[in-house]
Image (cartoon, helix red, strand yellow):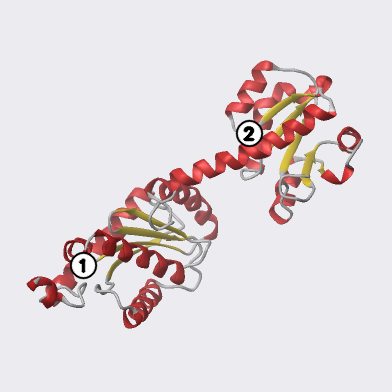
Amino acid sequence: MSINGGPIRILLVGEAKDACGLRGLLDTEDSGQFHIGHVADLDLAAERLSSDPADILVIHLESSKQHQGRAYVQAARAAAPDTPVVVLAESADELLAVDALRQGVQDFLDKQHLDRCALVRALRYSIERHRLQKNLQNLSLMDDLTGLYNRRGFLALAEQHLRMIQRKGAALLIYLDLDDLKLINDSYGHLEGNRALVVTANVLRACFRQSDILARLGGDEFCILMTDAGQDSAQQVRKRLQQRTDFINALSSWNFRLSLSVGIADVPVVHQPSLDHLLRIADGYMYEEKRNKQLRRTDSPALKQSTAASSS
């Protein structure tokens, strides 16, 4: 049995004879355990994986290419960032093997000293190690309470996506603050404050797409990078957030009333500022909205029963 109950999907990068050799090594028994695809180079591998994911990418490294091994391994990791990679080399190369492992390759196998049992074990272990590493990485990048990305996760992903935005254009950075979280905590306790944070996260999920990067930066602050805003303007985003917030408040039986302050910065395609600079711009717009709210009101809109709360 394979790890997911079906055959292990292997994509081999190499020549046709290398694919035949791999099939010959793996298909001596229980041939239904493996499904082996084949492409000639890493560019084709990246294209293939985008539409037909594999469980593992096996790179056949010929002796003539081992002197370029480091660059080849780097290209392989770039071609398959979300797929475990195993290098199958024509001969042993300890320095290259260590370097490949440091770059994120799961295993470096010497073809001359490889049998079916060792290969199957290496493939299975590589897939499982990669899965565990991704889980650990996700844990370190996610906010435990809301399930959104944390500050570390947002900064890492947003930096990557900003480079893509330079090619695609039309992006927005939204900085958002949950109004009066401290007052909710002080009046009704931290469990109710945590509920307000979770409700805010759910509002964001309802208003944005899965391709957008949603994060709780810490405390009462949230951030969203709309990676392909398309026809969405800042005004439309504000309207969508307000409509969803009003809908939640109308239906809820909680003591608090959800209120959000929002700042939105356009992400220019040309002469794009740093992520830190964009965050400061959006944060400034958010605080301007929060100050305007404070000037317009005499009591906090966050508490539905502010009078009762203040007398208790």
Q: Residue at x 88, y 41 (%)?
A: 30
From the image, tell me which residue sits under label 2: 74
Q: Residue at x 68, y 34 (%)?
A: 125
Pointers 1 and 2 in contact (CB under 8 A)?
no
In depth, the one of 3 and 211 nearer the eye is 3
Q: Say if 169 sits above or below 127 in the image.
A: below
In depth, the one of 40 and 270 nearer the eye is 40
Residue 39 badge: none
Foreground tag (1 vs 2): 1
State the image coordinates of residue 53 (x, y, percent, origin top left).
Answer: 71, 51
Badge 2: few (under 14), some or many (20 or more) residues near its Cα, within 10 Å?
A: some
Residue 290 badge: 1
Outermost residue toward the front? 312
Outermost residue toward the bottom? 250
Three-letter residue code for mark 1: Lys
Kindly state the secondary structure of the residue where label 2 is placed: helix
Decide which of tag 1 and tag 2 comes sooner along the chain. Answer: 2
In this rendering, would 310 be left or right of 126?
A: left
State the image coordinates of residue 190 (x, y, percent, origin top left).
Answer: 25, 59
In this rendering, would 230 be left or right of 217?
A: right
